[in-house]
Amino acid sequence: MITLLVCVVIYEIFEHIILPLFWTIRYRKRKSAYGPSGMIGKKCVVKQWRGTRGKVCVGGELWNASSPSPLVPGSVTIIRDIDNLTLLISPPDQSTETSMKSAKQ
């Protein structure tokens, strides 16, 4: 009976202290998938565009966006920054695509 009680206590310590500590240490430097830091650099598809403002689709969600250059609906762009709830986007060019690929490696 004492052996069973000791095993249960050891299991609970492992489950509630050691495993969460291990996962926290392992994933603490990972880039957040949420919020501005997780969205900058992602690709999005232009759905509607008029002048320098429009709507883009990111991860199945429709966002307001603005860009200094006019865009065509259906084109793929990259999120450069976020201002409140408006995405600041620009069309991808070769230099940024290659720098993003090299940064990921």
Image: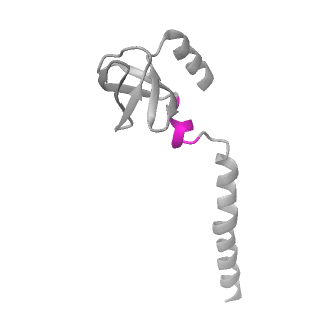
* Stretch of the chain drawn in magenta: 32-40
Quadrant where the image shows the C terminus: top right
- Pick whichever, 55 or 45, lies toward us: 55
Residue depicted at 29% across the width and 20% down the height: 73
Q: Is residue 33 magenta?
A: yes
Indicate the position of residue 65 as horizontal and vertical percent values. Answer: 40, 29
Indicate the position of residue 45 as horizontal and vertical percent values. Answer: 35, 26
Specify the color scheme: one colour
- Pick whichever, 51 or 94, lies toward us: 51
- Relative placement, left or right, of 11 versus 100 is right
Q: Is residue 103 magenta?
A: no
- The quarter holding residue 31 reads top right
- Pick whichever, 48 or 52, lies toward us: 52
- The quarter holding residue 72 reads top left
- Relative placement, left or right, of 11 versus 96 is right
Residue 70 visible here? yes
